[in-house]
Amino acid sequence: MNNKKYEVELLNAAEGRYLLFGGTLECHHEFFIDLEENNEGRWQQHFTEQEIKSIDERYWQFAVPLEDGE
């Protein structure tokens, strides 16, 4: 099973990167898109391929692999 992590980067604009975020780290059922700088560590932003595809298969085309250690 592949546990490689990805970010779903939907837009990289002058004001910053818009990413897919999940519910609080304890609760993974709420998803939204916001600027990366608004995260403050409360929301999940790193997902496995399976997690991304289970949210919506269309997000997979925007998945950006994380470097090891991120």
Image (cartoon, grey):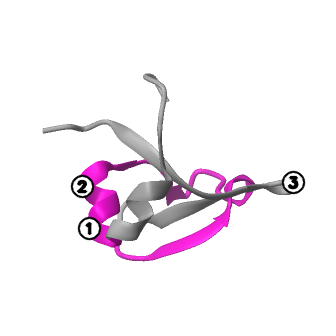
Q: Is residue 67 left or right of residue 3?
A: right
Image x and y of residue 63, in percent: 46, 50
- Total tally of numbered discs in the picture: 3
Q: Is residue 47 left or right of residue 11?
A: left
Q: Which mark is residue 54?
A: 1
Q: Which mark is residue 9?
A: none
> Tag 1: residue type?
Ser
Residue 22 magenta = no
Q: Are marks 1 and 2 in contact (CB under 8 Å)?
A: yes
Image x and y of residue 6, in percent: 43, 44
In this view, 52 is above or below 64: below
Question: Farthest residue toward the left?
Answer: 1
Circle 1 Cα neighbour tier, 10 Å, few/some/many (<14 / 14–19 / ≥20): few
> Tag 3: residue type?
Ala
In this view, 2 is above or below 24: above
In this view, 43 is above or below 3: below
CA–CA distance in space, label 2 to label 3: 30 Å
CA–CA distance in space, label 3 to label 1: 30 Å
Quarter of the image with the N terminus is top left
> Tag 2: residue type?
Gln
Provide the residue designation for mark 2. 50
Point 49% across, 30% down: residue? 70
The magenta segment: 27-56
Image x and y of residue 49, in percent: 30, 50
